[in-house]
Amino acid sequence: MADAGLEGCRILVVEDEYFLADEIATDLREAGAVVVGPVADLDGALALIRGGSSLDGAILDVNLRGEMAFAAADLLIERAVPFVFTTGYENTAVPVRFDGTARCQKPIDLRRVARAIGRVLRH
């Protein structure tokens, strides 16, 4: 996955499924990224985003233990941090304000997620 363009990038991983979060983090590290988290809930995500450490990007699961992650997405936008949604939901479940946000449908292809975050970081 070295072609993902993530070398040295600090990527926040927000995912409530433990094994999936671990796989995403492992793949990102293999691509040279510095993984922040992973965190499994909205409060943890908000704390890390507000925490003052710089983030280059984020991978954000839409549904975190029954709580929608849109507040975290709004905060990432406010701080100009590009991100990718992962979701098992239909596009209509995501508010219109996020229409331009890259999405990876679950079950996710880990290489596709790495490529997607790489693309949003380059733009």
Image (spheres, rainbow, N blue to C red):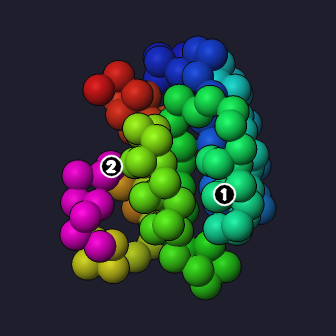
Residue drawn at the location 70% of the way across and 67% of the way down: 43
Reply above or below: 11 against 99. Answer: above
Which is nearer the N-term, disc 1 or disc 2? 1
What amino acid type is highlighted by mark number 2?
Ala
Q: Let me know if residue 21 appears in the view.
A: no
Q: Around disc 2, counting alpha carbons within 10 Å, would you say few (fewer than 14), some (14 to 19), or many (20 or more)? A: some
Which range of residues does the magenta coloring cover? Answer: 95-102
> Of the residues tagged 1 and 2, which is closer to the observer?
1
What amino acid type is highlighted by mark number 1?
Ala
Residue drawn at the location 36% of the way across and 55% of the way down: 103
- Element at label 2: strand
On the picture, is 57 further left or further right than 15? left
Reply above or below: 72 against 5. Answer: below
Q: Badge 1 is on which residue?
A: 45
Q: Around disc 1, counting alpha carbons within 10 Å, would you say few (fewer than 14), some (14 to 19), or many (20 or more)? A: many
* Residue 39: in magenta span: no
Reply above or below: 79 against 55. Answer: below
Residue 119: x, y in percent? 35, 30
* Residue 99: in magenta span: yes
Q: Badge 2 is on which residue?
A: 102
On the picture, is 17 further left or further right than 77? right
Query: Which image quadrant for residue 123?
Result: top left
As measured in the structure, the alpha-carbon distance from the residue carrying label 1 to the one carrying label 2 is 19 Å
Residue 107: x, y in percent? 50, 63
Residue 39: x, y in percent? 74, 56
Query: Which image quadrant for residue 35?
Result: top right
For this rendering, which residue is in front, 96 or 108?
A: 96
